[in-house]
Amino acid sequence: ALTLEFPEGVPVWNPEGTEWLMGSFPVVVENEVNAGEYGFLKEQWLEKKNPGLMTFGIRLYLRKRFIFAFHPDDTSYILLQNLSNYRKGFEYAVLAPMTGSRSVLTIADEAAHKIIRKNINPAFRPLALQSIAEQVSNRHIRKAFADLTTDARKGLVLQPVLRNFMLGLVSEAAFKTNDPDIGHQFEKLQSTLFTNVLAAVPYGTLIPTEANRVTRAASGKLRAHARRMILEARAQLAEFAKQGKTPPPAATLLDVLVRPPEDGGHGFRDDEEIIDQCCTFLFAGHETTSASLEWFAYALATHPDEEKALFEEAESVVSLQAVPTLDTVLHHMPLLNRFMREVWRVWPAAPSVVRTAVDDDVLPGSGQVVPAGLAVVVSTFYAQRLPLIWGDDADEFRPARWDEPHSAIVARAEKLVASGGRSLFLEQQKACKLQQPPWNRPNEPLADRIPRTAWMPFLVGHRSCIGQNFAQHAVLLSAAVMLRRYKWRMS
């Protein structure tokens, strides 16, 4: 039950039960997060029967208005073309106790972000992350899935298993250790930050509450672990230099950040900045990868025909007890790669990002007026399920779509209308104009003909996930083992 308002030209929906402090935030969390019904808001939009309406708003904490934008030209404009006017707001500052104040995730100032990104980019170059992903993943996959074999026959809740697995893997990839206390402190940070109402209020984390005390203590212990690892890494480098030896190739992100360029590193001298970037890598890396593997297992369990084809592919290139190489996964398992692209489309690990308008503006796709100070939610989830781009079956998990021509989408839409149904694809095609419509390139592969912001599980542009190569490679390596060794069914 949502009521419509139109302040300043922005349609705003207010669910019943709106609170004076948190607005509609509890209702959104209950439906979109706790219940896992990420399409809650989208369904409300579709009920309006307005195919051209590609923006809508909702009041959240402190009655602040957020507008959701998912027209491809709008999302491209916000994330790629007009970056200077759409900046990260204070919402991201709540992550600072976990990631640090100079993290690429939390810093809002574009000039400062550009400098930090430029400084750490060499550490995240694809070849370096490929090597780290393969080395670390091999060690952790062997142990994690050996342990899993013992419990799997009884049935198990997979989420904590995969989160612990990925937390250990990414912890070693970042800090050169999988000390259980790092994971313990990190879980404390997550549990307090994301359940603390004050975290959503400016400067709320400074108020002397029990949740804030726990947050500060856990953050202090996590950073103390990191400082110890940095000292050990520098001591090892000094010992190699003393002996006149060349250190082995960098095997962790911390190695790359600490080592001088002549030793295959980047030579950061500011320990706190190294800690910030490693903590960011730990936070973003384990959350996105574990969520992706959870949805991968769910997709296998609910699509047995797909699982059978994938198993046959894996069986032909991966032995039962081996962990595959990246070359095998990337270049000899096309069905697995297609399957994971569809997993990331239907269930993106980061379903939305928020940007705040600096000056008054108008979004080019929807024509929506955006007043200065308005928070704009770029919904990855909605953008990747938009009938205009993906067809009327956009909500369905169907990996075969990645190999189909555009004519297949049109044929399904026309068949739906002929049988008396409603085609949102055809309606939106008439109602919405696109700068680069995919139907103008009908014979190109799907990945090439869709707009850049139509599939962006790791975002796009210079604010995209800097560790996306590591995340994708770690997920594909793990998925190949999960697929090869087990059959997945819902219990």
Image (cartoon, rainbow, N blue to C red):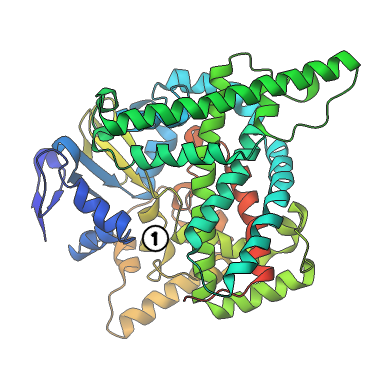
Whether residue 223 sits left or right of residue 377 in the image: it is right
Up/down of 167 relative to 2, above or below: above
Closer to us: 218 or 415: 218
Q: Position of residue 403 (x, y in %)?
A: 59, 68
Up/down of 234 relative to 188, above or below: above
**Residue 332's quadrant in the figure?**
bottom right
Q: Is residue 199 visible?
A: yes
| Residue corresponding to mark 1 | 385
Q: Position of residue 488 (x, y in %)?
A: 56, 73
Closer to us: 261 or 177: 177
Q: Is residue 52 visible?
A: no
Closer to us: 64 or 274: 274
The residue lying at 43 percent from left, 72 percent from top is 410
**At numbered mark 1, what does the secondary structure look like: helix, strand or loop?**
loop
Amino acid type shown at disc 1: Arg
Whether residue 283 sits left or right of residue 472 in the image: it is left
Q: Position of residue 400 (x, y in %)?
A: 55, 71
The residue lying at 71 percent from left, 64 percent from top is 333
The residue lying at 33 percent from left, 58 percent from top is 38
**Residue 313's quadrant in the figure?**
bottom right
Quadrant of the drawing holding the N terminus? bottom left
Q: Return the residue found at the far right.
A: 244
Q: Residues within 10 Å of mark 1 (few under 14, many from 20)?
A: many
Q: Position of residue 187 (x, y in %)?
A: 45, 42
Counting the numbered discs, the total is 1
**Residue 245's quadrant in the figure?**
top right
The residue lying at 41 percent from left, 27 percent from top is 217
